[in-house]
Amino acid sequence: MKEPHPLASISVLIADDHNLVREALAQALASDPNFSVTMANSCSGTLAQIKRQGHVDVLLLDIVMPGMNGLKSIEEFVKVNAEGAVVVFSGSTARDFIGQALTLGARGFIPKTMPLKSLATAIQLIASGQIFVPFGPPIPRSDPEVDDPDRLTARELIVLNHVSDGLTNKEIAWKVGVAEVTVKMYMRSICTKLKAKNRAHAAIIAAQTGMLQLPPHTA
C-alpha cells in the first residue's frame, strides 16, 4: 500500500475492488505531487484505512465493492469521513442514481468512463468544497479507443472481469472451467476487439466504458 506523501495537499483514498482499475487511478494521481494516494478493495478495508490514517480529503467510493450495501452505504461513509468528501465512483450514469447519491451526502459523482487525465481536476474541485457532477447528457458506453464494445461475448466479459481482478490465465481457466489455451484465445479476441495493447490495457478500457460489472463473475 502506498503511503501518503508528507508534502501532498490533497489526500485521496481509492476504494474499488477491481485491481487494475484501482492501480491505474492511483498511478494517474500519484504522478502529481499535489496528491497522496491510498487504496482499499472492500467496505471493511476502506473503513479500516480511514480509521488507521484518519479522514481523507476525498474518498473515491465504488458502491458495489464486497460488503457494500449499495447507495445505503454512502450515508455510513459520509459519517465516517465527515471532515472530508465522499465521491461516488460508478459505471452507472443514470440521473436518478446520481441524484440519490447526492441526497445521501455524496459531494460528487465521478463516472468510470471519465478519462484519467480529467480525474485530478475533478478531485481538486471536490477537495476545494465544490460538488462535482459531469455536465451534459449521460455519458454513453462508448470510447474512441473501443471498436464496438458490445461485440464482446458474455464469456469474454467474464474473462475480462477476472483479468481486472488480477487473476492469471491459469487461475481464470480454473474458475471458468476451460483450458488455459482457451483463455489465451479469449484474451487475443478481447484485445483485438478493444484495440488494446495488452491484458492490462484491455481491463482499463473496459472499466472506462462501463463493461466490468456486466455480466457478474460467473462461468
Image: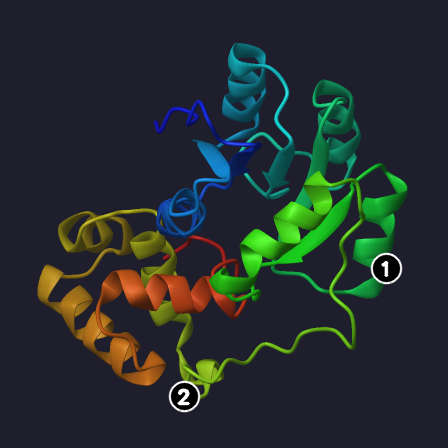
Disc 2 marks which amino acid?
Answer: Asp
Residue 108 place in picture, x, y as percent: 75, 48
Residue 76 place in picture, x, y as percent: 75, 25
Residue found farthest to the left? 181
Residue closest to the eye, 72 or 30? 30
Query: Residue, x 19% and y 47% (percent of image)?
Result: 171
Q: Quadrant of the C terminus?
A: bottom left
Query: Residue, x 83% and y 64% (percent of image)?
Result: 95
Residue tagged by mark 1? 96
Mark 1 or mark 2: name the one nearer the start of the chain.
Answer: 1
Query: Residue, x 17% and y 55% (percent of image)?
Result: 169
Element at label 1: helix
Determine whether, in the image, residue 89 is placed left or right of residue 21: right
Residue tagged by mark 2? 147
Q: Is residue 211 visible?
A: no
Residue 151 place in picture, x, y as percent: 42, 85
Residue 17 place in picture, x, y as percent: 46, 41
Residue closest to the eye, 151 or 74? 74
Whether 214 is drawn above or below 44: the answer is: below
Determine whether, in the image, residue 1 is placed left or right of residue 76: left
Picture quarter containing residue 126? Answer: top right
Element at label 2: loop
Residue closest to the eye, 113 or 121? 121
Whether 163 is drawn above or below 32: the answer is: below
- How many C-alpha atoms fall within 10 Å of the one at disc 2: few (<14), some, or many (≥20)? some
- How many C-alpha atoms fall within 10 Å of the one at disc 1: few (<14), some, or many (≥20)? few
Query: Residue, x 28% and y 56% (percent of image)?
Result: 176
